[in-house]
Image: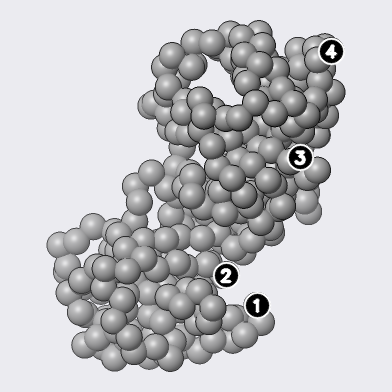
Amino acid sequence: MKITRLGDVEQNEGRSVAVGTFDGVHLGHREVIAGSNSVLTFDPHPVSVVAPQHTPKLLTSLSRKAELIASLGVEELIVIPFDADFAMRSADEFVEHVLDGALGATQVAIGENFRFGHKAQGDPRLLAADGRFATVVHPLLEVDGEIVSSSHIRGLVLAGEVARARNLLGAPFQLRGEVVHGDERGRELGFPTANLVPDETLACPGHGVYACLSYEDPAHPRPAAVSIGVRPTFQTGRGELIEAYILDFNGDLYGQELRLDFLQRLRGERRFDTHEALIEQMHSDVERTREIAQGN
């Protein structure tokens, strides 16, 4: 899939364009994108520019979003560098200069809640009234009684409900980070961990222990028991930690990027009275992780 900034896009009449922020590329987004040869999105998230105090923790970085969109068979991802100047463009200017002028769209697909232009004055009715392209408006998707939206999925992830989030995303919630040196507490307990630096702009599952798949080798994922929290059993002086115990792995990952796919929450974060009690629980967490990973 070709990735292009809007200012560098090639003139090409006949684009079928899906337009949206597409954070998470969830099941609803996939319905909007289906059948389009081009996707138009924004970076950074528009809210971070027009109302920075309300900037959400994102489900996907731009690179991860691009991977997911590419997996849908899209030929071209066009990225609008969203800034204060672009936010001032009217809805009519967006249609005139972007959809028609730059992209030469013959079909535009959007979700029913898509808004665009200065002060979000553009809506599906405005697009549908434009005769230069066909407009396809997709209703909000509902799965098992839940509306599929980025904000709802974000709330599930932050609450640790990663299995429910997966059902709405269409893929496991994924976290990536650089492996850094820790205080080697896990090694002392017999469970050496890869410690990740969380990206503060991205959503992170709530404190607890999770069954995951790790992709230190993309071709051979391994089960990983992942702890997110502040280690209540120990006085570490550290902030939030993401620690992955990768089953059946003894390599050195320092300085490398590690990908974790979250499958299920095992338990909440808790304090143990003794190291022995913690170790016993960790053995149980590892066995449950192995069982869950084998079923995925």
Residue 3 in sight in this render: yes
Question: What is the C-alpha distance between the residues marked 1 and 3?
Answer: 30 Å
275 left or right of 262 in image: left
Q: Residue 222 or 242: which is nearer the viewer? A: 222
Work out whether 162 lies above or below 9: below
Question: Residue 42's spot in the image, x, y percent?
Answer: 53, 32
Q: Which dot, 2 or 3, sits closer to the camera?
A: 3
**Mark 1–mark 4 CB contact (< 8 Å):** no
* Front label number (1 vs 4): 4
Q: Which mark is residue 263?
A: 2
Q: Are marks 4 and 3 in contact (CB under 8 Å)?
A: no
What secondary structure is marked by label 3? loop
- The residue positioned 80% from the left and 34% from the top of the image is 138
For marks 1 and 3, the one nearer the N-term is: 3
Marks 2 and 1, how far apart in space? 8 Å
Say how the picture is coloured.
one colour
Left or right side of 65 for 193: left
First in sequence, mark 4 or 3: give its number. Answer: 3
- Rendered location of residue 267, percent (x, y): 48, 72
| Image coordinates for residue 107, horizontal then vertical, percent | 80, 28
Residue 201: image x %, image y %?
A: 38, 44
Mark 3 burial class by Cα count in 10 Å: few <14, some 14-19, many 20+: many
- Rounded to the nearest angstrom, the CA distance separating label 4 from label 2 is 46 Å
Instruction: Please give the label number shown on residue 296.
Output: 1
